[in-house]
Amino acid sequence: MTTIGSIKKKCAICGKISKHSEILSTNVLGSPDLDTRPPNMERSTIFTWVQRCSWCGYCASDISKRIREAENIIHSVSYKQQLNNSAFPELANSFLCFSLILENVGNYAGAGWECIHAAWSCDDANLNTCAQSCRKKAVILLQKAREKGQSFAKRTGAEETIMADLLRRSGQFELALKVCNDGLKKNPEKIISDILRFQKILIGKSDVACHTIAEANDI
């Protein structure tokens, strides 16, 4: 069972107060997706994972905490354009704006994950083109994270499983296949190997759909 509460937060940027939803309790039933998105009921709490100040538009996981340089970023043209981009769901725009802030301060791993969250919110709205755009941006950010020595997944081969799913679901099959093979060369644990081999099967079918870890276990 999921319980959602309401909390007032004072924005660290403009100082004004707005109401936000927060998770009081939740649970999961079923298998995560290949990109680690949790099953329900936690899956349905995605709207609580990012907060947006209703006054100045500051987006963060907790708007009562200031992120370095955030004030300058939220007043930039690119931030304002993303915040109000009607092509994306409002929730996706909030994640993408949070991503812009994290990217600007050099947290490329965190910025990449916020793009993934934005993709999930686009999936929920059945906006496939927007979801693909978010995944492509996530790939760029996570590649930069690796170049900077920033880890975005802990277990051996796990970064390749996430990257492969992003590439496959955004239709970049050749790159996805290479990433799968790179991951398998690291001799990861069985669950990671199973996921990478399953990804290769999906890539061979030009499958861009969502699939679960449980499906990989069944191959």
Image (cartoon, grey):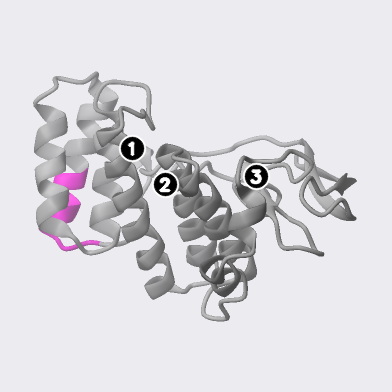
Q: Which numbered disc covers residue 41?
A: 3
Q: Which residue is mark 1?
A: 145
Q: Which residue is mark 2?
A: 112
Q: Is residue 218 visible?
A: no
Q: Where residue 38 appears, x then y in whole percent?
A: 52, 41
Q: Of the residues under marks 1 and 2, which one precedes in the sequence? A: 2
Q: CA distance from mark 3 to mark 1?
A: 30 Å
Identify the image quadrant of the N terminus: top right
Relative vertical location of residue 77 with respect to residue 134 in this rendering, above or below: below
Q: Residue at x 52, y 45 (%)?
A: 102
- Is residue 145 rendered magenta in the image? no
Q: Are marks 1 and 2 in contact (CB under 8 Å)?
A: yes
Does residue 8 appear left or right of residue 155 in this picture?
A: right
Q: Of the residues under marks 3 and 2, which one precedes in the sequence? A: 3
- Amino acid type of the residue that numbered disc 2 sits on in the rendered structure: Gly
Relative vertical location of residue 195 with respect to residue 209 in this rendering, above or below: above
Q: Where residue 28 appears, x then y in whole percent?
A: 61, 36
Q: Are marks 3 and 2 in contact (CB under 8 Å)?
A: no
